[in-house]
Image: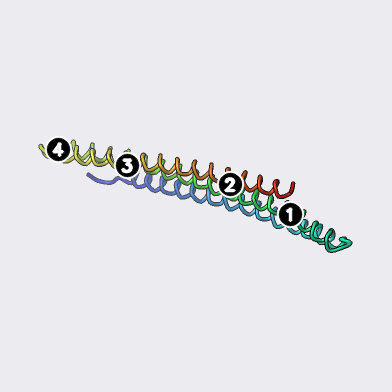
Amino acid sequence: MYVTPEQIQAATKANVEALLAVANAQFSAFEKLANISAGAVKSAFEDSIANTRALLGAKDVQEFVSLQNTLAQPAIEKAIAYSKSVYEVATEANGELSKVAERRVAEWNENFVSLLDKVSKNSPAGSDVAVAAVKSMLAAGNAAYDNFTKVTRQATEIAEANVAAATETVKGLAKAKKAA
């Protein structure tokens, strides 16, 4: 059994496509993070200028302390929103990279099964048991990979729910503190 130039070209093309998909996903995530960070820095700068002006306008210490407490609330909310945005970008990038990996694993499995079928056709009598054993091991590996993927997705969903719950809790605490 020989490897043809067409097979090498197809494998190379598939590898380059996978590499480009990973690079594209990473660049997209980097771009989103840069935009989020730039917006956060700009907002923090503008807020600090406005807050400084407000604090300088305080007439006494009590008003100064009251203003400080009032001005801290929006900063906390913006920090929570920033963290949530970064987490969403990271989750999205992870999802894209997982899709690329799943496609590559599926392609590899398909090619490997095809190779085993070709080998079994050209192999001596009695070797079909060994080929069946390898296919069985491959099926077991695929099942384990599928279970791992499902568990990973469930863990991601739980983490997302926990982040959402924590965000709501912090917002609730901040509102309660503000009301008090």
The amino acid at mark 2 is Ala
State which tag comes first along the sequence, 1 or 4: 1
Q: Residue at x 16, y 41 (%)?
A: 130
At 75% across and 56% down in the image, what residue appears? 69
Q: Which residue is mark 4?
A: 129
Q: Give the residue pinned by disc 2.
A: 166
Name which of mark 3 and mark 4 comes first in the sequence: 4
Q: Secondary structure at mark 4?
A: helix
Which quadrant of the rendered structure holds the N terminus?
top left
Q: Can you tell which of label 1 and label 4 is closer to the viewer?
A: 1
Q: Which is more N-terminal, label 2 or label 4?
A: 4
C-beta proximity under 8 Å, tags 2 and 1: no
Choose the circle earlier in sequence order: 2 or 1. 1
| Secondary structure at numbered mark 3 | helix
Q: Nearer the viewer, mark 3 or mark 2?
A: 2
Q: Which mark is residue 23?
A: none
Judging by the rendered image, the residue that carries numbered circle 1 is: 43
Which labelled disc corresponds to residue 144?
A: 3
